[in-house]
Image (cartoon, helix red, strand yellow):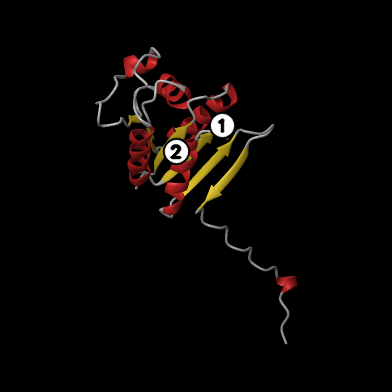
Amino acid sequence: MTEWLMISGSRQATPEMIRYACDSVRRAKEKGWTVMIGDNPKGVDLAVVSAFGKGLIVASVAAEGARSLNLLKGGRGDTTRSAAEYAARDRLMADMCSIGMFVWNGKSPGTKAAFDYMASLGKKCYLADFSGKKVKLTEANAKPEPPPEPKATQIRMF
């Protein structure tokens, strides 16, 4: 079974955030995963769609219909959708995907809310927080590594 990766990120994204998101998509595609991204014509969504275009599943806010890849790649498209519409789209993406990567500027309430929602589903997800000098990666619901096997010298027989 292939993994489905949700990529979500802030509309006000720095070049470092965009590189991080694109690197995440590149790694996922190398693993043969399916990648789903939103259709916002700004920030992380636009950068990922522009870099990878075909081969991604682009999720749209259903109320207004899908934007074409050509519009997104050209940086055009309306941004009149409400926060509630984007939140509904993000929740649907989280429901459909098995893993999430959230690239956050530390301010966007939508990106953080989507991460919190996916974490509440018990799914593996990561929040890359770019609000400080270094990126801080928060991991939710990742399976912990099993403890190492004891070495023979650590085992005492009585």
Upstream in sequence: badge 2 or badge 1: 2
Q: Distance between the residues labelled 2 and 1?
A: 27 Å
Residue drawn at (43%, 22%) of the image = 46
Residue drawn at (43%, 55%) of the image = 122
Residue topped by disc 2: 31
Q: Where is residue 95 in the image (x, y as percent from the top left)?
A: 34, 46
Tell whether 151 sits left or right of 11.
Answer: right
Residue that protrudes farthest toward the bottom in the picture = 158
Residue topped by disc 1: 105
Q: What amino acid type should be assigned to the residue bearing mark 1? A: Asn
Q: Where is residue 31 in the image (x, y as percent from the top left)?
A: 44, 38
Tell whether 24 sits left or right of 2.
Answer: right
Residue drawn at (60%, 33%) of the image = 130
Q: What amino acid type should be assigned to the residue bearing mark 2? A: Lys
Tell whether 148 sits left or right of 144.
Answer: right
In the image, residue 116 above or below residue 73: below
In the image, residue 33 above or below residue 1: above
> How many neighbours does mark 2 have within 10 angstroms: few (below 14), some (14-19), or many (20 or more)?
few
Q: In which quarter of the image is the C terminus?
A: bottom right
- As drawn, the label of residue 52 is none
Which element is circle 2 on?
Answer: loop
Q: Which of marks 2 and 1 is in front?
A: 1
Q: Position of residue 6 (x, y in %)?
A: 41, 38
Q: Position of residue 116 (x, y in %)?
A: 47, 47
> Looking at the image, do the residues carrying marks 2 and 1 touch, with CB atoms under 8 Å apart?
no
